[in-house]
Image (tube, grey):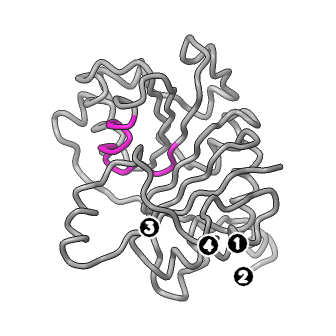
């Protein structure tokens, strides 16, 4: 390996996700064809002025990795007084959310199909987010893959800059080891305070819907851990 190749390898960022190929349903494709031009956002659009983007001033909720979008859709429906931005790399999930958002007539939702790290860096203004959500990220349960977990000190500080002071960072996972990892990282994170009175986990907030996978896991005796930290500086 020559020096240029070594430099390229060193600079290459470790991804916290894997792109999975998959065919899109008719509805998912409809979301891309008919709804993306209205609700879709791209990194090329640069920094967004949220009041102009949504046509109003309102609290902003941003979710990283919304999967197929079922819970994000429900939250946007249940909290019409808030604006929502979702970020997801998997095109079928984005198409599904867009299609369902159109059916529901939602106007308080916008979507990125890109790497959340890049979207936050290039598109989201500092101190603009009231609630930042990270639900059931890939746990990378094998020890040798833990470096791929998205909740890491550098990532948390990048999020901190985008949250308003007193804004919330809400995480949820069904892997106890990952919950412990999240708690450890956040307890050491500058500028954050745990909202748990026991300094560990909190009960599921009412605004977070229970997913069908969560219900199935509960029937099998699997736990879910919610962590909510507040930006204090």
Tell which tag, 2 or 3, sits nearer the viewer: 3
Front residue of 204/145: it is: 204
Image x and y of residue 93, in percent: 32, 45
Would you name the residue on which mark 2 appears? Answer: 1
* Of the image marks 3 and 1, the number of the one nearer the N terminus: 1
Q: Which mark is residue 173?
A: 3
Q: Is residue 128 magenta?
A: no
Q: Residue furthest front?
A: 197
Front residue of 127/100: it is: 127
Q: Secondary structure at mark 4?
A: helix
- In the drawing, does residue 33 fall left or right of residue 142? left
Q: Secondary structure at mark 3?
A: strand
Residue 58, quarter of the rendered image: top right
Tell which tag, 2 or 1, sits nearer the viewer: 1
Spatial separation of the CA atoms under disc 2 and disc 1? 10 Å
Q: Is residue 70 above or below residue 174?
A: above
Spatial separation of the CA atoms under disc 4 and disc 3? 11 Å
- In the drawing, does residue 225 fall left or right of residue 8? left
Q: Residue furthest bottom?
A: 143
Front residue of 73/34: it is: 73
Q: Secondary structure at mark 1?
A: helix
- Total number of numbered labels? 4
Would you name the residue on which mark 4 appears? Answer: 183
Q: Which mark is residue 44?
A: none
Residue 30, quarter of the rendered image: top left
Read off the magenta span.
63-75
Spatial separation of the CA atoms under disc 3 and disc 1? 31 Å
Q: Which residue is depicted at the point 42% across and 29% down?
A: 79
């Amino acid at each position: 390996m020559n020096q240029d190749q070594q430099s390229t390898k060193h600079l290459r960022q470790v991804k916290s996700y894997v792109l999975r190929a998959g065919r899109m349903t008719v509805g998912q494709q409809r979301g891309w064809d008919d709804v993306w031009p209205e609700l879709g956002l791209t990194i090329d659009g640069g920094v967004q002025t949220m009041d102009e983007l949504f046509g109003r001033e309102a609290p902003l909720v941003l979710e990283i990795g919304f999967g197929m979008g079922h819970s994000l859709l429900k939250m946007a429906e249940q909290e019409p007084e808030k604006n929502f931005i979702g970020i997801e790399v998997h095109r079928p999930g984005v198409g599904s959310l867009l299609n369902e958002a159109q059916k529901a007539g939602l106007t308080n939702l916008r979507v990125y199909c890109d790497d959340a790290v890049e979207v936050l860096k290039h598109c989201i203004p500092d101190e603009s987010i009231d609630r930042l959500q990270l639900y059931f990220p890939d746990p990378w349960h094998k020890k040798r893959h833990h470096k791929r977990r998205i909740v890491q000190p550098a990532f948390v500080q990048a999020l901190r800059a985008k949250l308003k002071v007193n804004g919330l960072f809400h995480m949820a996972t069904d892997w106890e080891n990952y919950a412990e990892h999240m708690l450890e990282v956040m307890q050491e994170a500058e500028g954050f305070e745990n909202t748990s009175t026991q300094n560990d986990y909190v009960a599921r907030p009412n605004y977070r819907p229970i997913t069908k996978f969560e219900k199935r896991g509960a029937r099998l005796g699997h736990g879910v851990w919610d962590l909510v930290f507040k930006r204090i500086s």
